[in-house]
Amino acid sequence: FYRFAIKGISFGKIYGLGLPALAQTLRLDKAKAFEAEAKILKEQLKLDPDNKKLQQQFDEKTQEAIAIREAEDDIEEARQVSEDFDKAFPKGKTYLEEVAARIGLHGFVNAPTGRKRSMYRVLTGVQSFLAAAERRAKNAPIQGFSSEIGISATYLALRWYDQFKRERKFNTKQFPLFTRVVHDASYFEVPYKDVIPFLWCYQYAATFGIQQKFSEVYEMPIPVPPEIEVTFSITEDEGHDWDWTLSSLRSVLEKCLDNQIALGDLAQEERANALNEILAAARDKELMGDLQKRFPLLNVPKLPKHVLEELTHA
C-alpha cells in the first residue's frame, strides 16, 4: 500500500488534486495493493494448489480489495495524509509553490537537466490560462525529467544490448525494434530469441544503469534507481503486467503466446516450439551467468537455482 500511496500522493500534489480526488486515489491505491498481494498468492497456489493457508490468505486479500473498492472515500484521511506529506517533505512543498509563482514571471520552467519548457499562454494575462499554466509548471519539470530518464535508458539499453550481441557473436540482424516513446514509457517489438536477454539488459539499464549514467553525465546523483514497470503484449488492447517474479514472467510469456494463437499469428501446434525458443536463453547456464554478471536482475547477481527454475520448468 505504501508504494501505491506515495505514488498517488506525489502525483496528486504535482497535478494539484483536491481532497476529494486525493481521497479517491488513496482508496483505489489500497485496493490495488491488496489485489497485487492476491495476484502473487494466486501464482503461488498454482505451484501448490493444496496449500490451505495460501488459499485462505488469497481469499482474505481478495475480499479486502473488493470491500475497499466498494467503500466511500475518506476525505479526512486524505487531508491528514496531505498535511503529513507536506511536513515530511517541506522542500518539495516549497518547490511546487515557487515553480507555480515563477511561471507567471518568466513564462518557462526548467527540468533538473536544464531543458526548458515554455508556456506562452501566461503572456495572455487570462486568469484561467495562468491557473492552467501553474498546474503544468508544477508537473512539467518532473514529468519532463522522467521522460528524459526514460528515453536515455532506452538508448542505453539498445547500445548495451548491441554490444552484448556483438561480443557473443550473436545474429545482429535480429534485434529488438524500438517503436516509440510516450512520456516516460518505451515500446519495443522483440524477437523470441531476444526476449529474455534483452529484458535482463533493459531492466538493468533503466534502473541501476541510468542511475549511474546520470551521475556521470550531469554530475547529479539520483539517490535511488528509477522504478520501472514492464508489460508484455501482442496487441495494444491486452497487456500482461510482470510483477518481477520469474513465475509471473513465465505466466505472461505464455499468455502472450496464447494471444498470438487467438489472433491466428501462431499455430497451436507451434506453441511449444515458440516457448522453447523464448526460454532457450534462460536454460543456457553460461549465457544466464553472463547476463546476471552484466545486468543482474533487480541488482541481485546470484539468483538461487530454485528461483530461476520458476521460469524454466517444463
Image (spheres, rainbow, N blue to C red):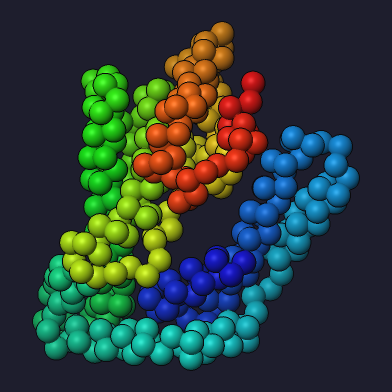
Front-most of residues 145 and 279? 279
Q: Position of residue 90 (x, y in %)?
A: 41, 90
Q: Quadrant of residue 141?
A: bottom left
Which residue is painted at 21% across and 62% down in the image? 216
Q: Quadrant of the N terminus?
A: bottom right
Q: Residue 212 location, x and y as percent?
A: 29, 59
For the point 36% across and 24% down, the residue is: 191
User: How many labels, in total?
Assistant: 0
Q: Vertically, is 313 above or below 188?
A: above
Residue 5 visible in this rendered orientation of the protein: yes
- Quick check: 242 above or below 312? below
Residue nearer the viewer, 186 or 103: 186
Q: Position of residue 33 (x, y in %)?
A: 63, 61
Q: Which residue is located at x 56 percent, y 83 percent?
A: 81
Quadrant of the snapshot with the C terminus: top right
- The residue under the point 72% across, 42% down is 44
Q: Is residue 175 left or right of residue 25?
A: left
**Does 241 sit left or right of 153 as displayed?**
right
Quarter of image, res 43: top right
| Residue 265 placement (x, y as % from top left) | 44, 17
- Residue 17, by quadrant, is bottom left
**Residue farthest top in this picture:** 269
| Residue 241 showing in the rendered view | no
